[in-house]
Image (tube, rainbow, N blue to C red):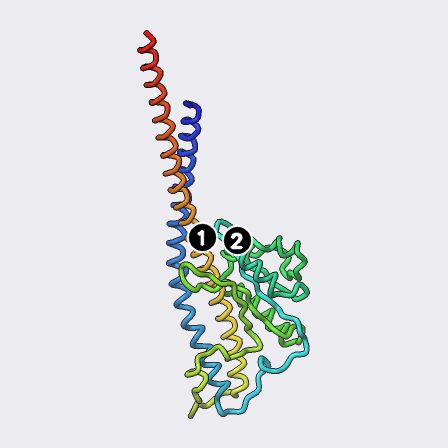
Amino acid sequence: MAGNRQAIQSRIRSVKSTKKITKAMQMIANAKLAKSRKKMESNRFYAGELQKLVTEILHSEEPFESRFLREHTSGRAYTIFFCSDLSLCGGYNANVVKFAQQNLSKEDPILIIGTHAYNQLVREGFNVVNDGPISVDALDEPALTKAISTAVDLYLDDEVGKVQICYTRFVNTMTFEPTLDVLIPYDDAHIADDAAGKRLTEIIFDPSIDEVLDNLIVQMIQNVAYAHALETKTAEQGARRLAMETATDNAEELEEKLVLQFNQARQAAITQELTEIVGTANAL
């Protein structure tokens, strides 16, 4: 009986230690989430305004041609895939990998940003173009711009017919959805009707509407890609905060059960000792 109580006490100490770690990780993730979310929302407005401006030009009465709107013979898609560098974030990585397995072709080129899923997708035979893992935490805007420029060049050379991003959309602090967004060819179907219905009037395009549109589309897809990168990081921190909160709650629940077991074992031991004392006294 004493050995059983000691084992329960040992488990209680272990659970308390684990709870301290998960609680600390939850607080860190919560702080990172607030910081990342603020940055994401600030950049999201700028990316949205760029998309609206491009949409207004596309719906204007001015005649135009764009390299980013023409038909391509290549049916391949170039995908920039975002995952996390670390685990301990619930089903975040598993969900985005499963989404890739269901929606991406293994023959098409894929650039993986984030170290967690790199080896798995390479083992599964995906056409991974990067030679080694690229850290998503170390990724900055210039590095992402360079990656986007490489993808755009492949598109303009007709080596791929589509450039897209596979990322995790931050819906709210409890919901994160793997999403596939096509950058080019540009489709304005997802822009609000009020923006799509606008007409540009009394605007002079210099040097020409075609060059202005091409430059705007390049800026737009680079900024949209950066916005998706920020959203992915925000979703990761949200998923990690939620996972650590769940782990902390489970640890507290397990601790309560173990304390109850310990008290029951101690009570049983005391009852047994009292019974033995009374029995001994009666025998005398």
Rendering coords of residue 65 (x, y %): 57, 87
Q: Residue furthest front?
A: 282
- Badge 2, how many Cα within 10 Å: few under 14, some, many 20+? some
- Badge 1, how many Cα within 10 Å: few under 14, some, many 20+? many
Question: In this picture, is 16 found above or below 61?
Answer: above
| Image point (42%, 40%), residue name | 18
Query: Which of the pair 274/8 is nearer the observer?
Result: 274
Q: Residue furthest top?
A: 284
Disc 2 element: loop
Q: Earlier in the sequence, mark 2 or mark 1?
A: 2
Question: In this picture, is 33 found above or below 262?
Answer: below
Disc 1 element: helix
Amino acid at circle 2: Asp
Amino acid at circle 1: Arg
Rendering coords of residue 16 (x, y %): 39, 37
**Quarter of the figure with residue 260:** top left
Picture disc at residue 200: none
Marks 2 and 1 sit apart, C-alpha to C-alpha, by 12 Å
- Left or right, 279 with reference to 237: left
Q: Report the label total.
A: 2
**In which quadrant will I find the C terminus?**
top left
**Mark 1, residue position:** 240
**Mark 2, residue position:** 85
| Image point (50%, 79%), residue name | 189
Query: Which of the pair 77/224 is nearer the observer?
Result: 77
**In which quadrant will I find the N terminus?**
top left
Rendering coords of residue 170 (x, y %): 44, 63
